[in-house]
């Protein structure tokens, strides 16, 4: 979907991504890359004493992974404008498999060669449970 | 700041983080981890033809790195509730050094052992330019 | 192209991928992952004394990176059968940007739900020079 | 073996490498590095429905790892000329331990200071099953 | 503790770090980064036949991880002078959670703006067993 | 050298390793893995104001990398007993190429199937300057 030009994106368009299993290695690598070693993600003993009962993936890990599930290779995105209503609604545990569901909410013309597109993203796990929602805004190229 | 208990966080509290230089290696590693190989971040020839003139860091890289600059080791964060008004306001180029500036905007009691704290985050580069802003919401423990 | 079903792949079909810049970080990460720290890839002083005059990317790095440029998300590949005539024809230096060009050479029926497809791959750099060629064989699903 | 000079390599020479266990982390790291997130390697739910019944390592992961099992530190390899008859003959599952067995097939003089050596590589797992075969060709230095 | 100035560090001061679970991914990543693929760390079959009965973390992995548990963000460390009596006293297995306990042993003035501080480090696992000890020496800034 | 059995190691034996160039990517990866983001290693602006004038590699990075330069594949090391007199004697800058020089200092019998070997390690850069020294102690297998 995000490979398309502005003219080809319309409110109501929907797209479902492939899935990706979130492994213990992913959590370690994200802790390492981000520098966020919060114990809920990286200390098995500590996490066992929380209501989650185990380590969970970082919210920003889930968000980062979702960006790799978008279909960007077309080269039509000018810039990532921003996000609103980002909510982490359920934990992602080691071994869960998540995918992204995108829906165009609205689009707004921004001149002769670009427009702003608002997209609702839901990340769901293998049980269909929504673990994250967000409203993305991207600047997309027009055809000419 | 994010090592504190709910009672010790008050509107107007401010905190400035250490800095981290964003290297070419960071961009490659984030592309790899996230799976987002969008050409603006990973193809030097392609990026040279955009208005940026060169590869730029992923917005979610900047956001992810910022989480490692927060001060979380105290173990007082119960959950990352969400974000609003996330805006990517300027590019981060290879070699730029970014840091986070946090300010408590407001807090709201959520029962006997927790509260919700809203924090404004600004990410600035070595020239003082703001490259990202966001309003974070976290659930924070009370002292008992 | 590699997202297609067997019936939709035909001799002569061609596809050109996006590009990816090969960075010093890529060479370090591939040396680390593979365990191949051969000095031509990882010792700047040693490499300076070879005919290449500098470090070059591992041949298998170029081959591995090419697989990420194929378009596999459709889920139609049953198995990677093998490769022939893999030739490393020119060095890839730090900072070069490579892309893949694929062409279906032939296909062969392998029963009611699969077929073998032979694909010629050329990896070219930003100057159009071919740095690697290979003949890939993949088992591809039929539509039913 | 690949630490030797051309004169010291002869048809029939055999060498067996140490082993390396292929972990879930290896598969995630190779998917990330290569950009090949094909679901057979990275989506546990999807892979469970294939004849393999679970995620398997990428063929190019196995090939890349094998290069780290070769004994290259001698600095006698001038270039990796190419490969033929690369065949992925059995799956490598998470937790399998693989090693390389190399045998010199033939060698061919290429002038006063180098020669081409053809080597058969078999990668076997902990049960002795061959998971990959290939015929490697390398340009090797002569002693002077 | 290591965020403090020289004047604020005194013999007998003690500090206990957060914990970090050592995963299989950590061992693979350290093997990759360091290039130390010794079979005791990376070959499950080989390690099963040693007195340890399984793979163990590299000693230098444990030491490297401990440095991330120190509290360095204050920017008061001028240089890492050295270590003595580094002893690896028990194995760290996959899944163990380690933390650091530091105690200032002595300090020595080194001029108007710095001093040398000797610190005893013990790394303990989730059962309270000491897996590594070391005596660290760091050059620390004075306040002016 | 460290591939040898106890009987074959004798005081005065010397061995020189291959080299490895320490890149900016290595420093970022070690900061990430270890969790040690001290500004001297990861903040270009901050490091520019120190006597070093630029970012330098972590001491433990140099030590960790050295272990990958040892020759361990023989499988004769029983355990890494410890280290003494570890001293970081000069900085390693981005782009420096380091190698290890080992010398057996003494050995001590520890029963019918093992002995302790003390080895002096010097890490030198491309200019021959010693950047780290250490005295390593390893438990090594006897031939039977």
Image (cartoon, coloured by chain):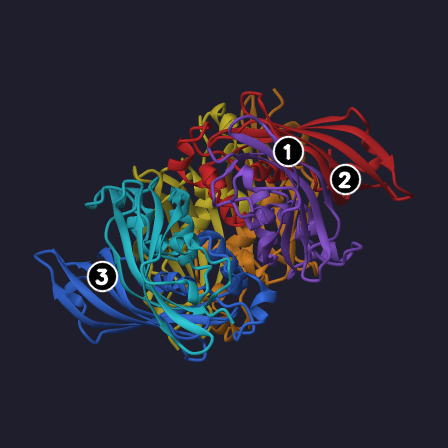
Chain colours: A orange, B yellow, C red, D purple, E blue, F cyan
Q: Nearer the viewer, residue F62 or D123?
A: D123
Quarter occupied by the N terminus of chain F: bottom left
Can residue A5 be seen? no
Tell me which chain the residue with mark 3 is part of: E
Nearer the observer: mark 1 or 3; the answer is 3
Instruction: Identify residue for label 1.
Output: A3
Q: Is residue A22 visible?
A: yes
Instruction: Calculate the distance from the C-alpha at mark 3 to the C-alpha at mark 2.
Output: 57 Å
Q: Residues within 10 Å of mark 1 (few under 14, many from 20)?
A: some
Count the numbered circles shown: 3
Are circles 1 and 3 on residues that touch, CB within 8 Å? no
Residue B100: % across, % down: 35, 49
Cβ–Cβ below 8 Å for labels 1 and 2? no
- How many residues crowd mark 3 within 10 Å: few (<14), some (14–19), many (20+)? some
Q: Position of residue C41 (x, y in %)?
A: 47, 38
Identify the subunit bearing mark 1: A
**Label 2 sits on residue:** C138
Q: Nearer the viewer, residue F137 or E132?
A: F137
Using the numbered discs, state the Cα–Cα distance from disc 1 to disc 2 in whole angstroms: 26 Å
Q: Read off the residue under disc 3.
A: E138
Question: What secondary structure is found at the residue carrying circle 1?
Answer: loop
Whether labels 3 and 2 belong to a single chain: the reply is no
């Amino acid at each position: 979907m995000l490979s398309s030009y502005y003219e080809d994106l319309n409110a109501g368009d929907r797209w479902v991504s492939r899935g990706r299993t979130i492994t213990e290695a992913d959590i370690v690598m994200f802790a390492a890359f981000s520098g966020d070693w919060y114990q809920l993600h990286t200390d098995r003993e500590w996490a066992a004493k929380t209501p989650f009962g185990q380590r969970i993936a970082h919210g920003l890990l889930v968000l980062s992974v979702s960006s790799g599930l978008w279909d960007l290779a077309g080269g039509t995105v000018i810039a990532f404008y921003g996000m609103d209503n980002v909510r982490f609604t359920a934990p992602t545990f080691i071994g869960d498999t998540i995918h992204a569901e995108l829906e165009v909410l609205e689009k707004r013309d921004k001149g002769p060669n670009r427009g702003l597109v608002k997209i609702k993203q839901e990340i769901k796990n293998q049980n269909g449970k929504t673990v994250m929602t967000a409203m993305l805004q991207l600047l997309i190229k027009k055809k000419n």
